[in-house]
Image (cartoon, rainbow, N blue to C red):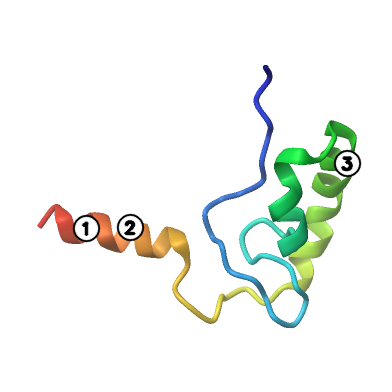
C-alpha cells in the first residue's frame, strides 16, 4: 500500500472567515474525507491549497496543536 501524502503541518485550526485550515488550507470536510479521497481528488485539493492559504488570516485565534505539543514537550523536559 502506498502512503497518502497529506498537506497537514500540525497547525490544526480553522479560519472562521474562510473556512480553511490555517496550516494546510483544507476545509473541515476535506480533512475528514482525506483518507477516502481518490488520488485524483487529493491532487486537485493540493493544487488549490496555495491560493487558499493566501486568503486566510495568518494567525489562528486559539492555540494550535503544534504549539500545544511543543509547550507540553517543554513542560515534561524541565
Residue at position x 67%, y 17% in the image = 1
Along the polypeptide, which appears first: circle 3 or circle 2?
3
| Residue drawn at 71 percent across, 63 percent down | 28
What's the CA distance linking mark 3 and mark 2?
32 Å
Which residue is label 1 attached to? 74
Image coords of residue 69 (percent x, y): 35, 57
Classify mark 3: helix, strand or loop.
helix
Per the image, the residue denoted by label 3 is 41
Residue 35 locus on image (x, y percent)? 71, 40
Q: What's the mark number on residue 70? A: 2
Left or right of 7, for residue 13 = left
Nearer the observer: mark 1 or 3; the answer is 3
Q: How crowded is mark 3: few (under 14 residues within 10 Å), some or many (20 or more)?
A: few
In the displayed structure, would residue 64 be above or below residue 36?
below
Q: How many marks?
A: 3
- Residue at x 10%, y 57% (from the top left corner): 78
- Could you tell me if the residues under marks 3 and 2 are in contact, i.e. CB atoms within 8 Å? no
Spatial CA span between label 2 and label 1: 6 Å
The numbered mark, 1 or 3, whose residue comes first in the sequence reads 3
Q: Position of residue 49 (x, y in %)?
A: 79, 54
SS at circle 1: helix
Q: Which quarter of the picture shows residue 53?
A: bottom right
At mark 2, the secondary structure is helix
Amino acid at each position: 500500500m502506498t502512503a497518502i501524502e497529506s498537506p497537514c503541518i500540525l497547525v490544526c485550526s480553522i479560519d472562521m472567515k474562510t473556512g480553511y485550515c490555517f496550516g494546510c488550507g483544507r476545509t473541515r470536510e476535506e480533512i475528514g474525507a482525506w483518507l477516502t479521497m481518490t488520488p485524483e481528488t487529493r491532487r486537485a485539493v493540493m493544487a488549490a491549497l496555495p491560493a487558499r492559504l493566501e486568503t486566510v488570516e495568518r494567525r489562528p485565534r486559539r492555540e494550535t496543536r503544534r504549539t500545544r505539543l511543543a509547550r507540553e514537550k517543554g513542560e515534561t523536559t524541565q
